[in-house]
Image (cartoon, grey):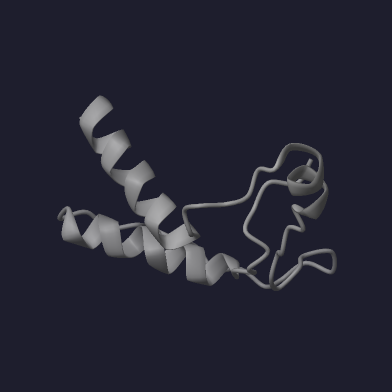
Amino acid sequence: YNVGSGVGHSTNAVLAMIDGHARASGLVAEVAHKPARPFDVSVNVLDCGRLEAETGWKAQIMLPDGVGRAWHWQARTHP
């Protein structure tokens, strides 16, 4: 199954979310930008329609909130 929300996000958008949490924690997210490779996609969107149809599952937490929760969980459990 694909698990997602059906909303696409670029790698740079996800990195910006992570960087925001890093800066708020006094850290710096070091990122090395390189040219895109021929097989790289600009935005990734997952269609979780099959999962919802077969199990009733659908996303309840959007990516920005999920990134924040993951960041804070990591900070609490691995200081």
**Residue 39 in the image, given as x and y percentages of width and height:** 84, 64
Task: Identify which residue, 66 or 75, lies in the foreground.
Answer: 66
Q: Quadrant of residue 18?
A: bottom left
**Residue 19 in the image, given as x and y percentages of width and height:** 34, 62
- Position of 57 with respect to 29 (left or right) is right
- Position of 57 with respect to 16 (left or right) is right
- Position of 39 with respect to 16 (left or right) is right
Quadrant (top left/top right/bottom left/bottom right) for the C terminus: top left
**Residue 66 in the image, given as x and y percentages of width and height:** 42, 51
Q: Quadrant of residue 44?
A: bottom right
At x 60% / y 70%, what residue is drawn?
Answer: 10
Task: Identify which residue, 14 or 46, lies in the foreground.
Answer: 46
At x 49% / y 63%, what residue is drawn?
Answer: 14
At x 74% / y 37%, what residue is drawn?
Answer: 55
At x 39% / y 64%, what residue is drawn?
Answer: 17
Task: Please indicate, yes or no, whether residue 42 appears anywhere in the rendered image.
Answer: yes
Task: Please indicate, yes or no, whether residue 78 appears anywhere in the rendered image.
Answer: no
